């Protein structure tokens, strides 16, 4: 349950074929900007957030209206509206070199353009995830199948995590359960994941 580069290092001696495949998995870095607003000042559109395609030319790639999406946030902070944005796409590194204050201002600018939100946040936090998002190019599922095939002969060993079956929390949990079943000799869950990958419920917003 390690990121692909670390897993490749661990497997290089015992499973060089799997290690070679895992070494080729690319990652993207990102930053998550969390903004807290006074609820009566945070006028947001309906829904729980939005995605921003690269063609829009914006700094943020997604926003989540966290207080609306996650009930526990609203319950713990009834006077606040918590909004999150994410920045950083594959191959996009210059933006992530900017300091936290600048990322906050870029997020506020793009939020205003998308939603009209012009209030000043009462608090802000930037959380950076270096190489946090494995990339799934065309052929990724075939690569994962080859990794598992290389490891099939190693008793008591299975792989799981975001590098294989999906980056969302539900996908990572499903991957872990499948690996535990595989170690006990039950391959049905791994086969099911291969045929039907778990869909992320947050739309790839990187949260």
Image: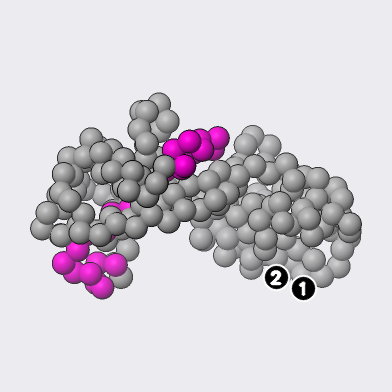
Of residues 94 and 44, the one drawn nearer to the viewer in this rendering? 94
State the image coordinates of residue 88 (x, y, percent, origin top left): 46, 41
Count how many numbered circles sit on residues in the image.
Answer: 2
Q: Quadrant of residue 201?
A: bottom left
Q: Position of residue 198 (x, y in %)?
A: 55, 54
Residue marked by disc 2: 180
Residue 88 within the segment the image draws in magenta: yes
Compared with 103, 165 (above or below) is: below
> Toward which corner of the image does residue 50 lie, by quadrant?
top left
Tell me the residue that label 1 is attached to: 184
Q: Is residue 81 left or right of residue 92?
A: left
Quarter of the figure with the C terminus: bottom left
165 relative to 88 in the view: left or right:
right
Look at 30% across and 70% down and name the residue there. 72
Image coords of residue 70 (percent x, y): 32, 63
From which residue to which does the magenta span run?
73-97
- Residue 161 visible? The answer is yes
Q: Secondary structure at mark 2?
A: helix
The answer to whether marks 2 and 1 mark residues whose Cβ atoms lie closer than 8 Å is: yes
- Taking 142 as reference, is 39 above or below it? below
């Amino acid at each position: 349950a390690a990121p692909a580069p670390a897993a490749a290092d661990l497997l290089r001696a015992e499973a060089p074929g799997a290690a070679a495949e895992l070494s080729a998995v690319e990652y993207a870095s990102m930053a998550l900007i969390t903004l807290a607003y006074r609820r009566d000042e945070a006028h947001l559109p309906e829904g729980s957030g939005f995605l921003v395609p690269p063609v829009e030319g914006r700094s943020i790639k997604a926003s989540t209206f966290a207080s609306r999406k996650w009930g526990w946030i609203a319950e713990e902070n009834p006077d606040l509206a918590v909004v999150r944005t994410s920045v950083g796409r594959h191959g996009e590194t210059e933006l992530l070199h900017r300091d936290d204050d600048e990322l906050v201002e870029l997020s506020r600018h793009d939020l205003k353009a998308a939603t009209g939100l012009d209030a000043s946040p009462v608090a802000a936090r930037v959380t950076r995830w270096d190489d946090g998002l494995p990339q799934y190019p065309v052929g990724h599922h075939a690569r994962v199948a080859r990794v598992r095939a290389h490891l099939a002969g190693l008793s008591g060993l299975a792989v799981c995590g975001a590098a294989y079956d999906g980056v969302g929390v539900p996908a990572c949990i499903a991957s872990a359960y499948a690996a535990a079943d595989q170690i006990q000799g039950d391959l049905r869950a791994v086969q099911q994941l291969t045929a039907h990958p778990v869909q992320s419920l947050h739309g790839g917003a990187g949260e």
